[in-house]
Image (cartoon, rainbow, N blue to C red):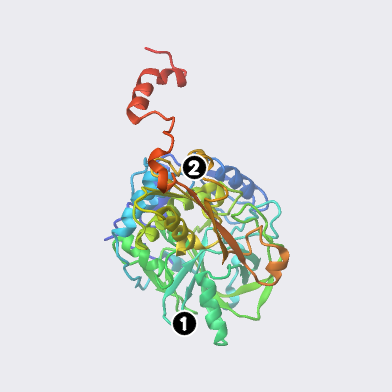
Amino acid sequence: MATVKALSRSKNLLPYNGLRDWIEKLNEMGDLRIVEGADVEKGIGQATELLQHHPDAPAVLFDSVPGYKKGYRVLVNLYGTPGRLALTFGLPVNLNKADLSNRILELVEGSKPIPYEFVDEGPVLENIQIGSDVNVDIFPSPRWHERDGGHYIGTGSYDITRDPDSGTVNLGTYRVMSMDKKTVGFYISPGKHGRIDREKYWANGEPCPTVIVVGGDPLLLVAACTELPYGVSEYDWVGGLRGSPYPVVKGRVTGLPIPADAEIAFEGFVRQDNKRPEGPFGEWTGYYASGAREEPVLDIQAVYYRNNPIVTGFPPQCPPDEQQRFRAIQRSALLKQEMEKASVPGITQVWCHEVGGARMLVGVAIKQLYPGHASQAGHVAAMCHVGAYAGKYVIVVDEDVDVTNLEDLMWAMSTRSDPATSIDIIHRTWSTPLDPRISPEDKKAGKMMNSRAIIDATRPWEWRNEFPVVNRPSKEWRRESEEKWGWVVNRVDKK
């Protein structure tokens, strides 16, 4: 066991330096709970499901996990509240979800990618297993859902791969199943960047060098969950938000860059002919989309980990849950950015709704500027990079509708659209085997496609000024009502 000097926090613009400092900030906010004695077979998974479906629940650090060394911990519900996600981006923790989404967009647009930087040492090198010494069974790996086919150490994890042609390093979040002390299996949906990298190596007859990081900087995990354009490294994106290069160490087996402050990292190769049964696993759509099937595995040749390592748990549940509350904020900001880059004007608000897995139901509010504006906005939202994967419904509304409010969005759709004339359908679009609506026959044939509905729920352009006036008070009327009569709603005696 080695003692490695902690990294300097110089130049980092964020209010924390890595996962452990971030956890301390949560503790100061009163937003962290420590639980001892929960087991990996049921306890951690059961508690996590409850936490993730309560929007005000704290983050929880599980310690003294039966069967594992004390100090080998599991952290869950990282981004369950807007405040914790705001902290991750270095923003005020009292923002509501819509304001937070807009502030994140401002941060992203105001930063420029900064390439990662190799350093000689970092906390992840405190403990190293090589070759025959590899044993990943020392880390707690929960069974997250009742009907999962096994234990999954990788939910709040990400895979590091490199494009063999361009050299760009990609970080992507994909589920990782524990198999034995030297092997984990992982599933990547078709079209995802990690899968593209992997298949390029296989096409050349080579194994794909891969590192799986299990626990580490919370902003790197956010980046790995984000639809960045192909060719943009998540390391560089985070470096821009930090204002300094992300420090990495070179993997001893693959040479891939590993976060110097990662909690745990598995390094090895993925071979095309090395597969094992993986799954089933409860997914973000709220279903078990498939049973066990043969998937590639990582042959682990080196393990790096900190003293008293922390596994980050980020399992998907039936939405809306922690994942979708976090992803709605992040993805909505990036979708608005992509639509504006596609020259769609007049966008006032975008929201990828939690109940749709932050993908399958999107609301877009616009200030109509010309005929066909609503149709343009809807089609771009459905087919740009952020919106293209596994989407289903895009509802375009006028600027007076709060698209973050599901009831407001459904009200506008119900009253301003006409089923026969307001819906466009796009066929043969990019979906995923995780989509429960794709038939078993199509899945067997590899036809992972669905359709998109673009619903124009704006006031019809030709007679928009004659559309009935909304029966809703003005802001001034509402403010006066709340000042004079709010005590009735709040059950507080009028003073």
Tell me the residue that label 2 is attached to. Answer: 416
Q: Relative to residue 31, is residue 223 depicted above or below?
A: below
* 473 to the left or right of 434: left
Q: Front-most of 333 and 64?
A: 333
Q: Relative to residue 108, is residue 56 depicted above or below?
A: above
Q: Front-most of 196 and 343?
A: 343
- Local crowd at mark 1 within 10 Å, few (<14), some, or many (≥20)? some
Can see residue 216? no
> Residue 436: x percent and y percent?
66, 57
In the structure shown, which secondary structural element does the residue marked by tag 2 occupy? helix
Amino acid type at circle 2 is Arg
Tell me the residue that label 1 is attached to. Answer: 164
* 114 to the left or right of 324: left
> Residue 107: x percent and y percent?
32, 55
* 291 to the left or right of 397: right
> Residue 43: x percent and y percent?
64, 47
Can see residue 493? yes
Q: Residue at x 58, y 54 (%)?
A: 315
Work out whether mark 2 precedes mark 1 in sequence or the reverse, and give the earlier one.
Answer: 1
